[in-house]
Image (tube, helix red, strand yellow):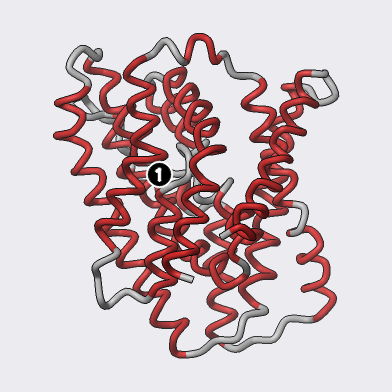
């Protein structure tokens, strides 16, 4: 447990570096979009590719891929439905147009942007492979079910074609291609693996620096005045993971590493992409951005605890 805690605190120390560098004007706010594009378009796909294609395929891996895909789909559908009656009870004074956004903040998890590097650093290559598989379903949720949540009780501009394009982002495409290569038994050239491996290693420090930049550019005085946002954020980083644990821990057909993964992915803060999706849908993008910032800040405390508890239970 102590080893896991030390690893994750070391990663979060890089967030502090990004925060301080932004406050001291070493890094500018204008640089963030370019750094995010570098992560999404190059370093993260390289990390995914090099980690998957170097893995040795066996029957247990094939079975776990199926289990994760089915379990993740079930998880997002159940959670999306579960937060509806909960939101009706706790957000009684909230403007109706914001209830859907708060529901999305409660369920959406940053298990890709933050999840990939942290999982690889803390739990190793095996769990990184599992979270890559999980991320395929997560992307489907983020660009489909989450839109329905945002538009809860309102008219939705749900467009299947645009959603399909969004779901097939570089990380998902590379994940699918890499798994096809793995299952086909194709051996990649060592030079290609060396290059993608080196580029992939950039992902963890770069992504944590970007998180620090975002926290530095957030107005926390305004955020902590919003009672409903605080409640939704507590659900995101604490209550939802507890519910996820109670959902999967007793299931005898799920191996321990899959149980760990499902609970672990539920513990990450609100997904960064939700801000962009909200803006595209014409919803309260400011509320979404505040939720991303607050849950990310809270996760600096909760994620090390969750990682330590899960490692002691399942590893």
Q: Position of residue 243 (x, y in %)?
A: 27, 49
Q: Position of residue 216 (x, y in %)?
A: 67, 22
Tag 1 residue: 142
Front one among 127 and 154: 127
Q: Position of residue 271 (x, y in %)?
A: 48, 39
Residue at the far front in the pictured view: 2
Instruction: Tell me what residue is drawn at x 58 percent, y 64 percent.
Output: 123
Circle 1 Cα neighbour tier, 10 Å, few/some/many (<14 / 14–19 / ≥20): many
Q: How many marks?
A: 1
Front one among 9 and 147: 9
Instruction: Tell me what residue is drawn at x 50 percent, y 48 percent.
Output: 305
Q: Quadrant of residue 32?
A: top right
Q: Position of residue 112 (x, y in %)?
A: 54, 51
Q: Quadrant of residue 89?
A: top left
Q: Quadrant of the N terminus?
A: bottom right
Looking at the image, residue 146 lies above or below residue 224: below
Badge 1 marks a residue whose secondary structure is: helix
């Amino acid at each position: 447990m102590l080893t896991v805690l030390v690893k994750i605190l070391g990663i979060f120390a890089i967030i502090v570096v990004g925060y301080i560098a932004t406050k001291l004007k070493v890094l500018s706010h204008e640089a963030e979009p370019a750094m995010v594009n570098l992560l999404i378009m190059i370093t993260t796909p390289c990390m995914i590719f090099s980690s998957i294609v170097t893995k040795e395929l066996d029957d247990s891996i094939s079975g776990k891929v199926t289990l994760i895909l089915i379990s993740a789909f079930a998880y997002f559908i159940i959670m999306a439905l579960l937060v509806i009656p909960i939101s009706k009870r706790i957000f009684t004074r909230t403007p109706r147009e914001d209830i859907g956004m708060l529901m999305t903040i409660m369920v959406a998890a940053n298990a890709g942007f933050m999840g990939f590097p942290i999982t690889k650093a803390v739990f190793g290559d095996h769990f990184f492979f599992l979270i890559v598989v999980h991320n395929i379903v997560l992307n489907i949720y983020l660009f489909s079910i989450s839109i329905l949540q945002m538009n809860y009780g309102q008219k939705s501009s749900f467009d299947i074609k645009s959603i399909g394009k969004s779901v097939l982002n570089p990380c998902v495409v590379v994940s699918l291609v890499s798994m096809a290569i793995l299952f086909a038994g194709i051996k990649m050239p060592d030079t290609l693996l060396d290059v993608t491996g080196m580029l992939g290693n950039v992902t963890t420090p770069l992504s944590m620096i970007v998180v620090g930049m975002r926290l530095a550019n957030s107005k926390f005085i305004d955020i902590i005045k919003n009672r409903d946002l605080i409640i939704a954020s507590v659900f995101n980083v604490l209550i939802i993971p507890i519910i996820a644990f109670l959902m999967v821990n007793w299931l005898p057909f799920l191996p321990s590493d899959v149980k760990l993964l499902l609970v672990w992915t539920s513990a990450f803060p609100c997904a960064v992409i939700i801000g962009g999706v909200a803006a595209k849908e014409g919803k309260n993008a400011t509320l979404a951005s505040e939720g991303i910032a607050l849950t990310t800040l809270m996760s600096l405390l909760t994620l090390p605890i969750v990682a330590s508890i899960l490692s002691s239970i399942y590893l």
